[in-house]
Amino acid sequence: MKEHEILRLLMNNKFICSVSYPEAYRHLRDNKVAYDRMVSQLQPFGVSLVTFSDGEVYAGLNNIPSDSDRRAVVKQFNEIYHDIAPIVEMIACLSTADEGNVLTVGENLNQTELVLEANNNKHFASMLNEVSEITGASKKPNDEKVAALLERLQKHEILKLVEPNKKIYRATGKIGYIYDVFDYIADNILDEPTEEIFAEQQGLKL
């Protein structure tokens, strides 16, 4: 992957990790000269090249947000809190057969196994039905409910379909960001996220 393509990913708020963009990830990780060059190239645009999840993920952070940027972040926070985080939590439950567990970067998810877990656990089946209201699949069979949840996470680049024939997905580096945002909102914001809390996004330590 050429550097201008990597810069475009960072400018477009993409999360670069070994799962989502492996070639770009290796270029940033292994080439200090290229990394420093891209840091300099991003600076005039008010974007910082940052890492999180113990260096497993690279992202571009906007240092000079406009009003439209603020509105976009508020919208994103609301979407993560109401629509994305509940799905992530549900998939984590099904993948580990345990509530309270989290997904990690690089973790594989087998769609067939997730469906079996939902079919064999009435509690998880009930949770699945509730969460599936988000995707509009609550009245469909469990296999279609699970498929809809996975497809939603794939759409948001939280999961990547790595083996289509076996329906195996892999968690990308964006999963850590999702957990950070959800925890931040839960700990600091009692009501809906508003533009006033935008400046506190830096508290996520991306």
Image: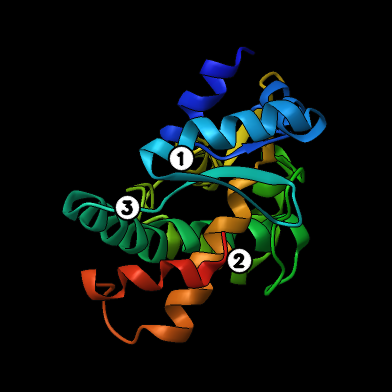
The spot of residue 106 in percent (x, y) is: 76, 43
Looking at the picture, does residue 164 appear above or below residue 178? above
Element marked by disc 1: helix
Foreground residue among 141 and 131: 131
Element marked by disc 3: loop
Q: How far apart are marks 1 and 3 (CA)?
A: 11 Å
The spot of residue 95 in percent (x, y) is: 73, 55
Which residue does the numbered mark 1 point to in the structure image? 43
Earlier residue among tags 1 and 3:
1
User: Position of 192 compared to 10: left or right?
Assistant: left
Foreground residue among 81 and 23: 23
Which residue does the numbered mark 3 point to in the structure image? 64
Label 3 CA crowd tier, 10 Å (few <14, some 14–19, many 20+): few
Screen quadrant of the N terminus: top right
Screen quadrant of the C terminus: bottom right
Label 2 CA crowd tier, 10 Å (few <14, some 14–19, many 20+): many
Q: Distance between the residues labelled 3 and 2?
A: 43 Å
Element marked by disc 2: helix
The spot of residue 4 in percent (x, y) is: 52, 17
The spot of residue 29 in percent (x, y) is: 77, 35
